Image (spheres, rainbow, N blue to C red):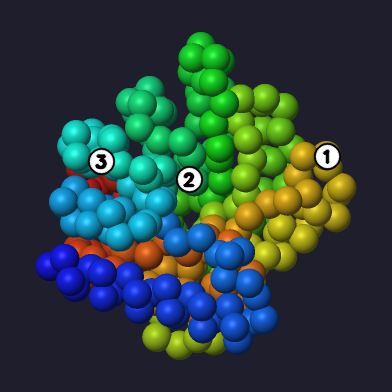
Amino acid sequence: MKNDIIFNLIQVHQRIENACRIAGRNPKEVQLLLATKTVPAEKIRIAIEAGETLMGENKMQELRDKNDVLKNLPAERHFIGHLQTNKIKDVLKYVTCIQSLDRINLADELHKQLQNQNRKLDVFVQVNTSYEGSKFGLAPEDVLSFIKKIKAYDTLNIKGLMTIGLLDVEKEKMLPSLRLLRTIREEIYSEGIEGLQDLKLSMGMSQDLELAIAEGSNMVRIGTSIFGNRFLGKEIWNENIAE
Ligand SMILES: *Cc1c(COP(=O)(O)O)cnc(C)c1O
C-alpha cells in the first residue's frame, strides 16, 4: 500500500511536469492538492510523509474523523466540498481555506463567524463552468457581481476561482469548462479591481489534469490517480445525498 501511493505520487508529479513542459509553464506554478475524500487517514499520512503539503476534504465528518491522525502533520487542509451553513463552525476548526464558496448566504455566514473569531480565511469562488445540474457553484455569468459583493468582506481573502470540469473521455468535451474559468478570470482582471489582480485557478482532477494545466491551472486536485478508485458514484458531489 505504501509503495503504491508513493509510486502513484511520482507518476502524478511526472504528469504535472510533462504538462507544464508542453504548455511552456514552470511546474512551480502548479500546486498539487491531495483530494482525500473516503481515503483513510493512514493512507493520507503516507502521502504527507512523502512530502505532500496540501490536502482537501469534502465533508466535515471526514475532517473530524481523520483529525487525530492528521492534525500534527505538516499539511494544510482545504475544504473542497459543498458546505452547508450549519457546518461552517466545525469546518473552520480544521481548514485554512474554503474552495467551495458558491453563494452569498454562505459568504455572509462565514464573514460573521470569522469576525467573531477575529480571523481571516482564504477562499476560492466555485464556478459551475460545465453548467451541469448535478454540480454546485455559481453560474459563470454571476461570478463578477458575486466577487464584487464579497470583496467588501475583509475576513475573506479571495485567492481565486475553482471549478470541477466536465469529465468525459473526449478532450474536446472537457476543454470548454476549463477554458471558461480562465476567461472568467480575464473578465475580472479587466475590471481592474484592487486586490483582485492575482487570482489562482483551482482546476484539474485525475482525468483532466493535463488539459487543466494547458488552460492555466495553478492547483490540481487529485484523488483517484494517487489513492485508487473510490467505488462511489457521482453522488459524492452532493453532501445531502452522501451523508
Ligand atoms: C474528488 C474530488 C477531486 C479529485 O477527483 P479524482 O477524479 O479522484 O482525482 C477533485 N476535486 C473535488 C472537488 C473532488 O470532490
Q: Which of the numbered marks, if any, corresponds to residue 194?
A: 1
The 10 Å Cα crowd at callout 3, few under 14, some 14 to 19, many 20 or more, is: many
x then y, percent, for residue 106: 50, 31
Q: Amino acid at mark 2?
A: Ser
Q: Give the Cα distance between marks 3 and 2.
A: 22 Å
In the rendered image, the vertical position of residue 80 relative to residue 47, given as above or below: above
Quadrant in the picture for residue 47: bottom left
Q: Which of the numbered marks, if any, corresponds to residue 100?
A: 2
Residue 105 as seen in the image, left or right of residue 6: right
The 10 Å Cα crowd at callout 2, few under 14, some 14 to 19, many 20 or more, is: many
Q: Where is the N terminus found, in terms of image quarters?
A: bottom left
Quadrant in the picture for residue 206: bottom left
How many labels were placed on the picture?
3
Residue in the picture at 61% in, 25% down: 155
Q: Amino acid at mark 3?
A: Leu
Mark 3 lies on residue: 70
Residue in the picture at 42% in, 57% down: 33
Residue 44 as seen in the image, left or right of residue 125: left
Residue in the picture at 68% in, 52% down: 199
**From where the camera sits, is residue 105 visible?**
no
